Amino acid sequence: MHAMPTFDALQQATGSHFQLWVSDEQALEAQLLAVTEGQAMSPRHQRYAAEFALPAGTELPQAVFRLSPPGEQGWLLLMTPVSPDDDGRPVLEAIFHVDRPL
């Protein structure tokens, strides 16, 4: 697995498509909708959330999924269902709480 994606890297990838692995053999397309900063636990940390839209009709629980850019290994992320996007597509959110870049 790669190091966790940075806020800047995810923000630049907004609108891009990723692979959300629901099993070792099956991946769904997930579109990065938004990346937002939040309140971190201390000044030396950074907190941000990334929301990914799934194909219409997909129902997934909160779970640890592998999410990857096409052709890459990606990351293991705890992802939680949140409100659907404006088109009604289901959305999963991953929250990152990491050391702030120097």
Image (cartoon, grey):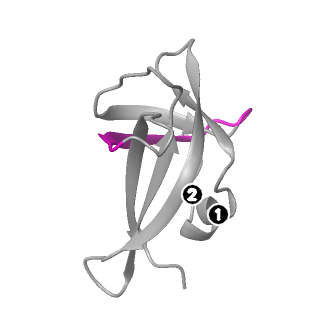
Residue 21 position in % (x across, y down):
52, 25
Q: Is residue 4 visible?
A: no
Q: Quadrant of residue 70?
A: top right
Q: Residues within 10 Å of mark 1 (few under 14, many from 20)?
A: few
Q: Can residue 27 be seen from the camera position used here? A: yes
Q: Which residue is mark 1?
A: 9
What's the magenta region?
A: 70-83
Rendered view: 99 above or below 5: below
Q: Residue furthest right?
A: 71
Q: Is residue 2 left or right of residue 23?
A: right
Indicate the secondary structure of the residue bearing disc 1: helix
Residue type marked 1: Ala
Asked if 6 appears above or below 51 in the picture, the reply is below
Number of numbered discs visible in the structure rendering = 2
Q: Residue at x 42, y 40 (%)?
A: 91
Q: Secondary structure at mark 2?
A: loop
Task: Classify residue 64 as left or right of residue 66.
Answer: left
Name the amino acid, label 2: Pro
Where residue 83 appears, x then y in whole percent? 33, 44
Residue with the mark numbered 2: 5
- Residue 95 lies, with reference to residue 85, above or below; the image says below
- Closer to the camera in the image, 14 or 24: 14
In the image, 84 versus 19, the foreground residue is: 84
x and y, in percent, of residue 52 in the image: 50, 44
Residue 13 against residue 20 in the figure, above or below: below
In the rendered view of the protein, which quadrant contains the C terminus?
Answer: bottom right
Query: Would you say 93 lies left or right of 40 here?
Result: right
Mark 2–mark 1 contact, CB under 8 Å?
yes
Residue at image point 51% right, 39% down? 87
